[in-house]
Amino acid sequence: KYNTQTAISVLRQVHEYKHWWDMTKISLKDIGNTQYLACMNPTAGSFIVNPRLQRNFWTCAVPFPETGALNTIYNTFTEGH
């Protein structure tokens, strides 16, 4: 529906095999020294991650911090500058 299968397949292939194929040059492209970080919006979008992609990652759910914690975080930044 959203034409995202190709992007998911490329991410999975790179993570599992450390390369992808350049179909215009018919050559192997080695991918190294990469890190992946993602987040999901709990109120919009798709709430399902493809299991074939998700099996390669550690999933952690973190709730939004309380007001006191946010004040501590941002005060640390503002007092340092």
Image: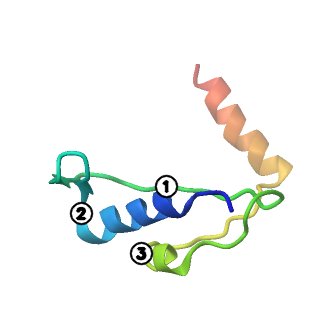
Q: Is residue 53 above or below residue 65?
A: below
**Residue identifier under label 3:** 56
Q: Residue at x 72, y 42 (%)?
A: 72
Q: Depth-wise, is mark 3 or mark 2 nearer the camera?
A: 2
Mark 3 or mark 2, earlier in chain:
2
Q: Quadrant of residue 66?
A: bottom right
Mark 1 or mark 3, earlier in chain:
1
Q: Residue at x 39, y 60 (%)?
A: 10
Which amino acid is tagged 1? Leu
Mark 1 or mark 2, earlier in chain:
2
Q: Position of residue 68 (x, y in %)?
A: 82, 48
Q: Position of residue 58 (x, y in %)?
A: 48, 73
Circles 1 and 3, Cβ within 8 Å, touching? The answer is no
Q: Secondary structure at mark 1?
A: loop
Say which quadrant the N terminus sits in. bottom right
Residue 37's label in the rendered image is 1
